[in-house]
Image: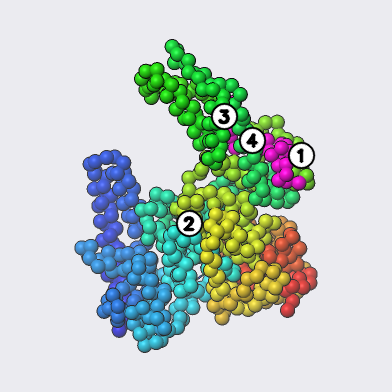
Amino acid sequence: MTTLADERQYVETCRAALRRMLESACENVIAGEGVAGDRYSAERLGRHLKSLAKELGEEPGGPPFFGRLDFGAGEHRGRRYYIGRRHLTGEHGGVPVVIDWRAPVSRAFYRAGARDPLGVTTRRRYGWSGPSLTGFEDEHLGRGEQGGGAILAAEIERPRVGPMRDIVATIQPEQDELVRGELAESVCVQGAPGTGKTAVGLHRAAYLLYAHRARLERSGVLVLGPNRAFIGYIAAVLPALGEVQVEQTTLEELLGGTPGSTEAGAADSVEAAVVKHDARMAAVLRRALFGRIGKPAEPVTVTDGAVKWRVHEDELRRIVDDTRRESLPYLTGRERVRARIMARITRQAELRGVTVTAAWTKKMGRQVTPFLEEVWPAVKPEQVVFEVLSDPGAAAATLLDERERAAITWPRPPRSVRSARWTAADMVLLDEVAGLLERPAGYGHVIVDEAQDLSPMQCRAIARRSEHGSLTVLGDLAQATSPWAARDWSAQMAALGKPGATTVVLSTGFRVPAAVVELANRLLARLAAGVPPTRSFRRDGRLSVSPVAELAPAVVRAARAALELEGSVGVIAADADVAGLRDALRDGGLDAALVQPGDGGAYRRLSLVPASAAKGLEYDHVILAEPAAVAEGEPRGLNRLYVTLTRAVSRLEVLHARPLPAALIA
Ligand SMILES: Nc1ncnc2c1ncn2[C@@H]1O[C@H](COP(=O)(O)OP(=O)(O)OP(=O)(O)O)[C@@H](O)[C@H]1O
């Protein structure tokens, strides 16, 4: 047994360890900069040490640990470990004073229970107020006692005041199993709102980088979210865990679009977008690209000045046909044809006694280019998509019906490729062609959030980048709002290139209070998503549903009252109602940040959120203005309503001037 005073003393030991690590990292930066040897490794070492020094320097006041394990049996019998966000090295590089939460021994902190204590006699959790240790709670697992006490509940129920934070202190066993899953295994997580899918995905990235650092630093880890606002919300979690090398972006940006550019630029009709996102477009584009390959009709002749060498058209036809059958990327195939022609020419030259040098081969190879341009022409993705959207006739015949072909045809084709304005769906088509031309560089691991909304063509873009890596796919079929959304996970995982991947269901919610969950669950039957209802971990929270005479003044009053309380406030409304509410809030003297999908946004206590941008976000207090308008706003309006009902952490206030949607009335 240790007292609070002992534990506070240990905090000082940890802070001293942190200071020592910082000093030695700074010294090493200086030493590292003077390292002899090659400049590349000196620079790399310097960069690594500098970022370590910066990281350490940024966290001197933070809690150095959040838990403790006392082992009474097994490999660690008689040992005590403090668990924190990072290893803190002991004096003279001795036993660490704090163990990283990702280390193998820390697993017991998350998984041990009274039924299977994993050798742990006591698990201790600490409560902190800023940098000060305020208390602790013990579970004597060895004596069969288990129960998340007040500290655990307080951490899960604390008001949200800024962007998303890490959950390392309170990861639950079913979440931990996913976080520490094998790198090679792709997994799909179906989870109700607030079950921690996003949190699990981010912590999994941090865990994998710890467990497979060398490999993943080379191949890369990518986190894909639905929009910029969401990425802005989650962006600080991984850096807070010491991981700054994970690329976090939206699919749109990954494929070369700039945030929000498509809203400002060209847009598709729903009909056109639905066809462009259909898997058959992959076959259309393949045909449009590979249809360029022609039949050789004349021999290839090259000369070194003295002698002419020739490859006959029959031979050329065989080369082209054989290469086509190999199903290589288009440009690789083109170079393979060149190499095979050159092999024939080289053999002839050698038989004639010519000494074949690299310069000779290069010179002859260049003379094959006109033939290739004729028979296997180089092309850019823009050219292929331009042709298909100008006239899908030949490429789409038999693949798309007449109406579908008409839907994707440009009403007024741009004069040239260069003047074309591409829509978001076109960017996916361009990426498909780029992938047919050359294989893109992939990632070691890709984490895909809100994956239920991905189209078959978007899935292919991700599959191309994770062909040799693995995937963590996170989503909720009940929150599917796109016209092409997934209906079941096995098909979606197959589209993502990982057929047969396991699907794990999470159903305990950590965000939404029980009363709010009960209201949202009423919609589930109507959504026919085949997912189980959520159970809430939380017993706190408040729900009110109030009819009002006039919406805007009621929203302003509610927002003003909510700002008196602690935590963030989000006003969520149908997209069409946002402009009016914005004016009303401004006239009422309230400064609300407008959340836009394409914009990472600055954090303010009061946010105004169009329903279409609410996915993945959360606010302590949510004012949902006119649910009927949200439900009517789009074909999958009830799914959208389900999303908006599940954004509240502590309080949901539903205000309606019109009758509530029938599906919401029990
Ligand atoms: N084990 C946990 N301990 C503390 N907080 C948790 C835990 N798991 C999840 N949370 C919190 O619950 C909230 C919801 O988590 P998260 O956003 O990851 O859920 P989600 O399943 O992605 O939700 P949605 O489907 O609505 O996007 C977050 O604030 C997260 O920090």
Disc 2 element: strand
Cα distance in 3D space between marks 3 and 2 = 40 Å
Cα distance in 3D space between marks 4 and 2 = 33 Å
**Left or right position of 472 against 426:** left
Which numbered disc, 3 or 2, marks the residue that appears first in the sequence?
A: 3
Hey, which residue is sitting farthest bottom in the picture? 143
Is there CB contact under 8 Å for labels 4 and 1?
no
Q: Tell me where the magenta segment starts and ends, as one range.
A: 373-401
Disc 4 target residue:
291
Question: Which residue type carries mark 2?
Answer: Ser
Q: Is residue 377 magenta?
A: yes
Q: Quadrant of the N terminus?
A: bottom left
Looking at the picture, how far across and down is residue 584, in whole percent?
A: 71, 61
Disc 2 target residue:
470
Local crowd at mark 1 within 10 Å, few (<14), some, or many (≥20)?
few
Looking at the picture, how far across and down is residue 20, in whole percent?
A: 26, 61
